[in-house]
Amino acid sequence: MEDEDEDRRRVAAHIEWQKQGAWVVVWGAYTRRYWAFARWPVPPGGAVVHATDPEALYAEMRKTERQYDFLRWRYGGR
């Protein structure tokens, strides 16, 4: 189980790297889920998503990015 957790921690680190620091991504060994915390300005309380696998986590992250207009913040715009 420890090796499996280490692999999932590496996956979480890779996802965080791919998102260029816009999210903090961790593997929850107790919850058996990936967790992502938004690092750009979002309403009070922040934006936190979780999923059991990387593909589902990416989907939740994209949904949240659309909800909170991440691209406008990241790249500017009207």
Image (spheres, rainbow, N blue to C red):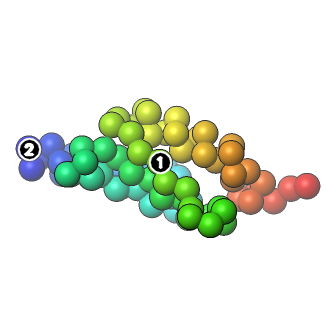
* Residue 61 visible in this rendered orientation of the protein: yes
Residue 40's place in the image compared with 29, above or below, is below
Looking at the rendered image, the disc whose residue lies closer to the viewer, 1 or 2, is: 1
Residue type, label 1 = Val
Q: Is residue 29 left or right of residue 3?
A: right
Q: Is residue 6 left or right of residue 63?
A: left
* Rendered location of residue 52, percent (x, y): 33, 37
> Which residue is denoted by mark 2 in the rendering?
1
| Quadrant in which the C terminus is drawn | bottom right
* Rendered location of residue 38, percent (x, y): 54, 59
> Which residue is denoted by mark 1 in the rendering?
49
Residue at mark 1 to residue at mark 2: CA–CA distance: 24 Å
Residue 5's place in the image compared with 41, above or below, is above
* Residue 11 visible in this rendered orientation of the protein: no
Q: Secondary structure at mark 1?
A: strand
Query: What residue sits 9% from the left and 50% below the top?
Result: 2
* Rendered location of residue 51, percent (x, y): 39, 39
Q: Is residue 25 left or right of residue 74?
A: left
Query: What residue sits 34% from the left and 35% below the top?
Result: 53
Numbered marks: total? 2
Query: What residue sits 20% from the left and 51% below the top?
Result: 29
Q: Nearer the viewer, residue 19 or 32?
A: 32
Mark carried by residue 21: none
* Rendered location of residue 74, percent (x, y): 71, 59
Q: Residues within 10 Å of mark 1 (few under 14, many from 20)?
A: some
Looking at marks 1 and 2 on the same chain, the residue that comes earlier in the sequence is marked by 2
Residue type, label 2 = Met
